[in-house]
Amino acid sequence: MTHFQNLTEAVSTMRARGFVNTFTIQHQRVYCSEQSCELSPNQLTLLERHTVPSSTSQSGQQEVYGFRTDNNLLGIMTDIYAEYDADEFHSVFRQCRQTE
């Protein structure tokens, strides 16, 4: 497992490895700004998950996730939305497929 010093390092390393899209949660759906499209959470498969230190989050750490869509787009999502609406974040995240 890769260990990152902070969120910036994690995101930049993942982007260099092809996770070029950004996924955010909006109204129980996932939005991809680069593709200007909405996705159902069950169209995403979680490929990797990293926990990094964060002085700006309530817990002192933040998570960054690497997802693949059904049409093979790679993208990143962070758990920052969970700080604003933890229930909605966890509801959407649970619908995403997990790799074995």
Image: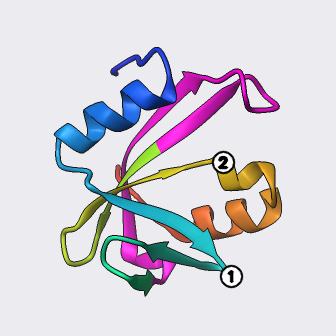
Marker disc for residue 80: 2
Camera-side residue of 43 and 18: 18
Marker disc for residue 86: none
The residue pinned by badge 1 equals 27
Residue for point 81% across, 63% down:
87
Q: Secondary structure at mark 2?
A: helix
Pointer 1 or 2: first along the chain? 1
**Measured from the top left, where is residue 80 in percent x and y?**
66, 48
The magenta segment is: 39-64
Residue for point 40% across, 60% down:
22
Gap in angstroms between the C-alphas marked 1 and 2: 15 Å
What is the count of numbered marks?
2
Q: Residues within 10 Å of mark 2 (few under 14, many from 20)?
A: some
**Measured from the top left, where is residue 60 in percent x and y?**
73, 22
**Measured from the top left, where is residue 85 in percent x and y?**
81, 61
Say if the magenta span includes residue 52.
yes
The residue under label 1 is which amino acid type? Answer: His
Residue 28, quarter of the rendered image: bottom right
In the image, taking residue 42 as reference, residue 55 lies left or right, namely: right
Residue 84, quarter of the rendered image: bottom right
Residue for point 54% across, 28% down:
51
Say if the magenta span includes residue 35.
no
**Measured from the top left, where is residue 10 in percent x and y?**
39, 30
Position of 22 relative to 65 (above/below): below
Position of 29 relative to 75 (above/below): below
The residue under label 2 is which amino acid type? Answer: Ile
Position of 77 relative to 63 (above/below): below
- How was this image coloured? rainbow
Q: Secondary structure at mark 1?
A: loop
Q: State yes or no: discs 1 and 2 in contact (Cβ < 8 Å).
A: no
Q: Residues within 10 Å of mark 1 (few under 14, many from 20)?
A: few
In the image, taking residue 8 as reference, residue 89 lies left or right, namely: right
